[in-house]
Amino acid sequence: MASNTEAVGAPATQPTDVGLKREMGFIGATWASETSIIGSGWLFGAFLAAQAAGTAALLGWVIAGVIVVILALVHAELGGMYPVSGGTARFPHFAFGGAAGISFGFFSWLQAVTVAPIECFAVMQYGSYYWHGLYNANKSNVTTLGFVMTLVLLAAFTALNFLAMRLFSKVNAGITWWKVAIPVITIIILAFKFHANNLGAGGGFMPYGIKALFAAIPSAGIVFAYLGFEQADQLAGEIKNPQKNLPLAILTATGIGILIYFLLQLVFIGAIPHSLISGPKGWAGIPATSPVAIGPFAGLAGLVGLGTLAVFLRIDAFVSPFGTGLMYETSTSRVGYGLARNRYFPQPFQKVDKNGIPWVSLIVAFLAGLLFLLPFPSWHSLVGLVTSASVLMYAGAPLALGAFRGQVPEADRPYRMPGAVVIAPLAFFLANMLIYWSGLEVIWKLGVCVVIGYVIIGIFMAMDPQRPPLDWKSATWLPVYLIGMGIISWQGQFSGGAVAAPVNTGHIPFWWDILVVFVFSMIIYFWAQRVRLSREEMLNLVNKQAAVGAGPDPRVH
């Protein structure tokens, strides 16, 4: 159990990554996060959110934006404090040891490895406008041809990732400037087609109720659209002057993304032809074969007579998901590298080539992405799983921040989050609300993935004589947390699936369920802080990944 009177000694040693090259500046770091935020989410999020919640989708973007800002503040402090690649997979390892580190590390890797396939599917869906054989609108799935082309696109992401980081950063920056410019131009142009009476159409401001609004935040792609603000953390081992550039990059990218998404939702609602939402079902009555459903913004531009804009949007429908998929392939390889530094993944995952690219981890990311293409053959069906994996990953960050504040209060923190004693547990609660809103159907699938992850990592660690201790005493809260969230979801109000009979019981009444999640979150948060690693144990884990004693350079020439 961690003592409340732990001695404060010399500043903590900085963990150092071996073989990577710090070649990315502030703009590159900002665009690494921004290109992940502005991906397929902007192409589909506004339509899916409006379809699920009506005009109240605007409120959904605000709620999710507040949550993301709070989580971004947490990641900004952690990234500046310990600028290591695959940071989200490593902070809980330092704070709580092996057992907790494995869980949140695998969540990080699972989330990262599934996004690139999602972006490929988005390209196929939009691309079907010109190449009809890629996507079946009636089944909402890619065709056999679309599946093959998805494999080709995923291979292209992997090939480009073998560029040196300084070149990769320039390629990504060029793509991201385009990705930001097109949504901004779309907002400006569609504003001239704005009809204020649409804001109350389709059944009023909140036609399907507040419960539907909360469910839409994870399931309709709102949270998914915001994912990626932490990408600068994942690439921290390759950022110049990370203590300054990394926190600023995370907060800048998050602010830009929230503003763009809110305005996109506003103009989408205002510009859509009134006839599409005037039926008895309102927004939910838009047919799946409508141009707006297949390619929301491009279809909308065509319907309102903006043919030139529609062409640019269909081009962007390739560029935006391509840029995001490219960056997530990058981050997946860095998370794998970080897990190898934790000694959860085999040590070959640390191998880097002459350009500083962790090539083994990159190739494995490609192969794992292929597996995730098999059981989830459409964009929308993957979103719930990835969102839940992401917020499980994000839940580890406030736990780690609270632990670090007690373990190494004197450590250098270039960005120090104000009010951490309140904001850290609040961030943990909000992450858990996103998990709960995802619904039981998504959560049980994620649970299966977690069990598989434990088996895989357990096998890897069993073969590593230098594996770290599991530190079960510092993770006694973990099984209670994971099982408890599953039970609350089972007894709660959100099924997370379009099934006739919900798999959840609904025994916990609406509104009371929020209180239950809050109380449960506070119990787990303060329990985790109570049993965190001692200062000495925590510093020992950090020192094992410091430059001194880091072992031979794994670079392969």
Image (tube, rainbow, N blue to C red):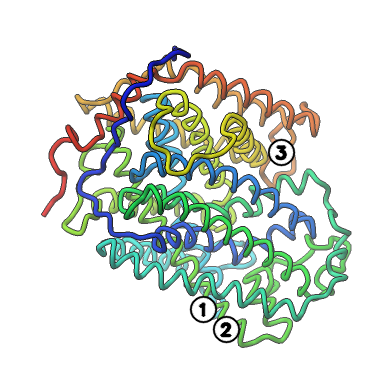
Query: Contact (CB < 8 A) between labels 1 and 2?
Result: yes
Secondary element at tag 2? helix
* Residue 335, picture quadrant: top left
Left or right: 234 as drawn, with respect to 530: left
User: Which residue is disc 1 drawn over?
Assistant: 315
Query: Which residue is disc 2 drawn over?
Result: 311
- Going from N to C along the chain, the mark reached first, 2 or 3, is 2
248 w.r.t. 285: above or below:
above
Up-down relation of residue 14 to residue 195 (above or below): above
Mark 1: which secondary structure? helix
Could you tell me residue 166's position as x and y percent? Answer: 28, 64
Q: Residue at x 50, y 62 (%)?
A: 121
Depth check, front residue: 469 or 293: 469
Query: What's under tag 1, amino acid-wise?
Result: Ile
Residue 284 horizontal/vertical position (percent): 78, 60
Report how far apart the C-alphas of labels 1 and 2 lie in the structure: 6 Å
Is any atom of residue 94 visible in this view? yes
